[in-house]
DNA sequence: CGGCCTGTTCTGCACAGCAGAACGATAGCT
DNA sequence: AGCTATCGTTCTGCTGTGCAGAACAGGCCG
């Protein structure tokens, strides 16, 4: 990012800042957008309307706004609805068996999107992250999916600067970690994206071998035990296998 | 895309339109941006400065502006420089053998970017498209690369609306065409992206089997002959194989 | 149902965004 | 190398556009 231009245009600055916020922080309401920009609610609403008009934003089902396709993040729609109904019973069963929150995520560019969340029944639990996005290289499901790609594909994904998501991704370290993920069969995210949350993720292969979805278990770090890891990983593998079978059947 | 908002903000509209133009049409100068928006050159320059400031644009080496990282298109840098030096002799040899313009393209999201162009020696030829981007589903190299992906991955890429690139991609038709591409071993783009230009593309597999780069031949449609297709496809295959061998050695 | 909060619509006003002019840089030709 | 035309960049006066506040509409919870 550069110095502020000598002849800056404030209205344009507001719009571009808002687009960047939508992309980085997932769904935002009008009031929060107004707060973050330091403008009136009516101004924030007008800016959001302009962003929607030019596809830099989209409205969600809960009166909030998300990044739109012009920001390079297509909003999954219909295929996701099918995926959700297919995966939901399996995720519910998984959460019942282990009593931790389970998620289904989809790789979109260099982020994973949460498509389904089934929360654990306990009072202390990781909550619902449906609709949110996380950097793929940090999230457990994201790492599992990146590990199902070639090194070349991963490098191509992270080529070039990412000034909107500092710090820049250390691709050498990422590739080393992805090799470990491949060996173990699952990926770990220990407080890498949220304080106090530890998650284990596993890729789900599509009918033709490649993977673009993942299942994961997310738990309070206080409940994470290394000696239980093999058990959780086994449950994830079984869930992934069941989903894979169903995907193979329905095409 | 929606109706124009009741309380539109013209300055914001100009900026967002310009960002979209940069993304769709590759490098633009200040004067052309002014023309396309219907504003003064000084206004276009101020808008571009704002886009650069917030990473929706970047300046290139020739006083022009390209889409920036905030538009979800990381600008390939170092890996591309290596790729260029590796591929250039092979592309030169290809262009000498067939006397048509050859290109090396990289799949980035749902577009292909032209990384290397070697122009044919003839007076009537397809020119240099380095730095430009085309929709993957229309370009020959793009189709070849999409064909190296699973149907599921292609669907995930095109899920959701793409109103900035009308018409919306007919994914069923695209999948059918990609099946043909897989059978034949090459992809064809007959005037699908530029009037009077026909191109043949072939994916180059990476060291571990997958492909994110393609080689293609682009020619004036007047010089395209169906009876020559097998010959051109054979030359492309040979060039792809040579590049693959070199990637396997150095990669 | 009522109250509260948030999203959406409308309008008066002053200052921010615009275009034109001037200046600086670049490219091409002789 | 010098000149010219074109294009990028900087500056400024002015008016109409973008802003905030007020009013209205919608949604949620007790």
Image (spheres, coloured by chain):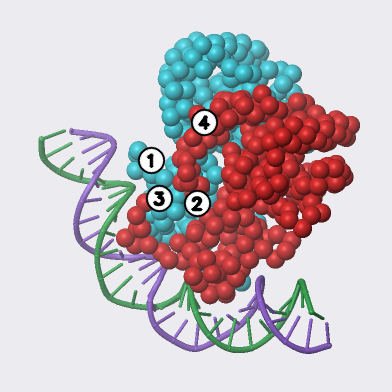
Chain colours: A red, B cyan, C purple, D green
Does dot 3 land on a helix, a strand or a loop? Answer: loop
Q: Residue B74: x, y in percent? A: 50, 39
Compared across the picture, whether B51 is left or right of B182 comes to left
Q: Residue A16: x, y in percent? A: 49, 58
Mark identifier at residue B16 = none
Q: Which residue is mark 2?
A: B19
Chain ID at mark 2: B
Quote the CA–CA distance across marks 2 and 1: 15 Å
Q: Which residue is mark 1?
A: B60
Which of discs 1 and 4 lies nearer the camera? The answer is: 4
The answer to whether marks 4 and 2 mark residues whose Cβ atoms lie closer than 8 Å is: no
Q: Which residue is mark 3?
A: A1
Question: Is D14 or A227 nearer to us in this picture?
Answer: A227
Chain ID at mark 3: A
Task: Please tell me how crowded label 1 is: few (under 14), some (14-19), or many (20+) other residues with Cα within 10 Å.
Answer: some
**Residue sitting at x 58%, y 25%:** A151
- Looking at the rendering, in which quadrant would you find the C terminus of chain A? top right
The answer to whether marks 4 and 3 mark residues whose Cβ atoms lie closer than 8 Å is: no
Task: Please tell me how crowded label 2 is: few (under 14), some (14-19), or many (20+) other residues with Cα within 10 Å.
Answer: many
Question: Is B22 or B221 nearer to us in this picture?
Answer: B22
Does dot 1 land on a helix, a strand or a loop? Answer: loop
Q: Residue A43: x, y in percent? A: 54, 72
Chain ID at mark 1: B
Q: Which residue is mark 4?
A: A173
Quote the CA–CA distance across marks 1 and 4: 30 Å
Quote the CA–CA distance across marks 4 and 3: 25 Å
Which of discs 4 and 3 lies nearer the camera? The answer is: 4
């Amino acid at each position: 990012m550069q110095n502020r231009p000598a002849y800056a245009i404030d209205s344009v600055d507001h719009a571009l800042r808002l687009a960047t916020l939508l992309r980085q922080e997932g769904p935002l309401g009008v009031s929060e957008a107004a707060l973050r920009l330091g403008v009136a609610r009516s101004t924030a609403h007008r800016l959001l309307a302009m962003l929607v008009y030019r596809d830099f934003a989209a409205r969600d089902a809960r009166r909030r706004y998300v990044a739109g396709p012009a920001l390079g993040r297509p909003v999954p729609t219909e295929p996701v609805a099918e995926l959700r109904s297919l995966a939901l019973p399996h995720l519910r069963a998984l959460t019942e068996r282990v009593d931790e929150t389970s998620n289904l995520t989809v790789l979109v560019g260099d982020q994973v999107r949460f498509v389904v969340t089934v929360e654990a029944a306990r009072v202390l639990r990781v909550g619902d992250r449906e609709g949110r996005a996380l950097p793929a290289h940090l999230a457990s499901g994201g790492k599992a999916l990146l590990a199902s790609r070639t090194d070349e594909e991963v490098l191509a994904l992270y080529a070039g600067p990412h000034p909107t998501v500092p710090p820049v991704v250390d691709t050498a370290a990422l590739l080393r970690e992805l090799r470990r993920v491949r060996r173990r069969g699952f990926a770990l995210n220990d407080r890498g994206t949220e304080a106090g949350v530890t998650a284990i993720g596993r890729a789900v292969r599509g009918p033709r071998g490649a993977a673009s979805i993942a299942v994961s278990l997310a738990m309070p770090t206080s409940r994470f035990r290394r000696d239980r890891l093999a058990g959780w990983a086994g449950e994830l593998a079984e869930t992934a296998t069941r989903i894979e079978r169903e995907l193979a059947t329905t095409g």
